[in-house]
């Protein structure tokens, strides 16, 4: 089972050593990424999720994206309908020939 902290609880974490100025940045970065990945994997549930407090409700963002997509779809539909020329046999780009 994954371990997690509730709001207000403290998690004991080992202090991060202060690097010396001459230390190789690439090695430090690689080790930092490995430590972060190891920590995330250590708190992951066996089913694959992470349990924690919900800090934001993404419903508004999701609704806004859906709204924008639906408006884009309506605009695309109107644009395609404006190109339809029954006398020319279907969709044609507006040009001097088709007015």
Image (spheres, rainbow, N blue to C red):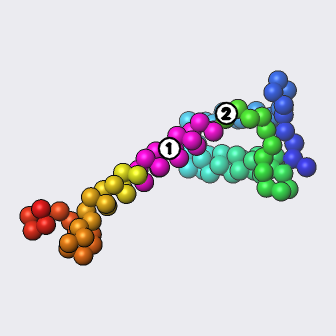
Can you name the residue that lies furthest to the front here? 87
Whether label 1 touches label 2, CB < 8 Å: no
- Mark 1 and mark 2 lie on one chain; the one further toward the N terminus is 2
Residue holding disc 2 = 56
Is residue 56 inside the magenta stretch?
no
Residue holding disc 1 = 67
Q: Nearer the viewer, residue 42 or 79?
A: 79
Instruction: Determine the secondary structure under disc 2.
Output: loop
Can you name the residue that lies furthest to the top here? 8
Crowding at dot 1, Cα within 10 Å, few <14 / some 14-19 / many 20+, comes out as: few
Please state the total of marks drawn on the protein image: 2
Looking at the rendering, the stretch of residues picked out in magenta corresponds to 58-73
Instruction: Determine the secondary structure under disc 1.
Output: helix
Residue drawn at x 57%, y 41% as measured from the top left = 63
Can you name the residue that lies furthest to the bottom here? 89
State which quadrant residue 7 falls in.
Answer: top right
């Amino acid at each position: 089972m994954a371990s997690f902290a509730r709001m207000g609880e403290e998690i004991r974490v080992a202090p991060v050593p202060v690097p010396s100025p001459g230390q190789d940045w690439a090695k430090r970065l690689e080790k930092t990424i490995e430590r972060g990945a190891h920590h995330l994997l250590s708190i992951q549930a066996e089913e694959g999720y992470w349990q924690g407090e919900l800090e934001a409700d993404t419903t508004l963002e999701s609704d806004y994206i859906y709204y924008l997509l639906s408006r884009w779809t309506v605009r695309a539909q109107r644009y395609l309908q404006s190109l339809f020329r029954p006398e020319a046999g279907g969709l044609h780009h507006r040009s001097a020939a088709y007015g």
